[in-house]
Amino acid sequence: QVRLVESGGGLVQAGGSLRLSCAASGPLSTYAMGWFRQNPGKDRVFVAAITRSVAWDGGKQYYADFAKGRFTISRDNAKNTAALQMNNLSSDDTAVYYCAADLYGSGSTQTEEYEHWGRGTQVTVSS
């Protein structure tokens, strides 16, 4: 069982940046990692995903349209961590952000593909 803990959320002004981190209790090399976000009363929405590293390529990255060009997902298997760098934030990005792990996954955009989830970290962007 992999436990995931997110950190790095907070309050930021529009146009600012935040870096979210996801720390795992064990090795992540066999997992695809994803970030999702959710607002009260709404479905959890895909933000970004990164596959396992193959031949030291660092993993293939996938992004929701709203994240392209502003967010960057990364992973560090040596440290059992994943991260989401978020730039040029707007009030629309306000949400609870969740880290998720999918064993042998391919970077799915679907929540049901991910077996392990963190408890989330709140991101609030003031306009």
Image (cartoon, rainbow, N blue to C red):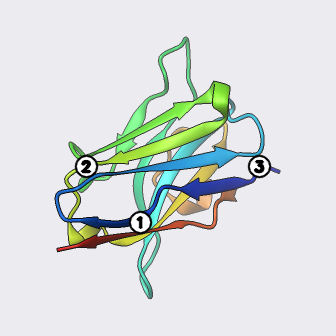
Residue 95 picture location, percent across and down:
39, 72
Residue 63 picture location, percent across and down:
34, 46
Instruction: Name the residue beneath numbered marker 2.
Output: 87
Amino acid type, callout 1: Gly
Task: Choose the circle earlier in sequence order: 3 or 2.
Answer: 3
Instruction: Name the residue beneath numbered marker 3.
Output: 2
Task: Choose the circle earlier in sequence order: 1 or 3.
Answer: 3
Crowd rating for badge 3 (residues with CA inside 10 Å; few <14, some 14–19, many 20+): some
Residue drawn at (56%, 23%) of the image = 53
Quadrant for the C terminus in the image: bottom left
Q: Nearer the viewer, residue 59 or 85?
A: 85
Task: Choose the circle earlier in sequence order: 1 or 2.
Answer: 1
> Which one is closest to the eye, mark 3 or mark 2?
2
Amino acid type, callout 3: Val
Crowd rating for badge 1 (residues with CA inside 10 Å; few <14, some 14–19, many 20+): some
Name of the residue lying farthest toward the top = 55
Q: CA distance from mark 1 to mark 3?
A: 25 Å
Residue drawn at (75%, 53%) of the image = 3
Residue drawn at (41%, 79%) of the image = 39
The numbered mark at residue 10 is 1
Crowd rating for badge 2 (residues with CA inside 10 Å; few <14, some 14–19, many 20+): some
> Which one is closest to the eye, mark 1 or mark 3?
1
SS assignment at label 2: loop
Residue 85 against residue 113 in the figure, above or below: above
Residue 13 picture location, percent across and down:
22, 66
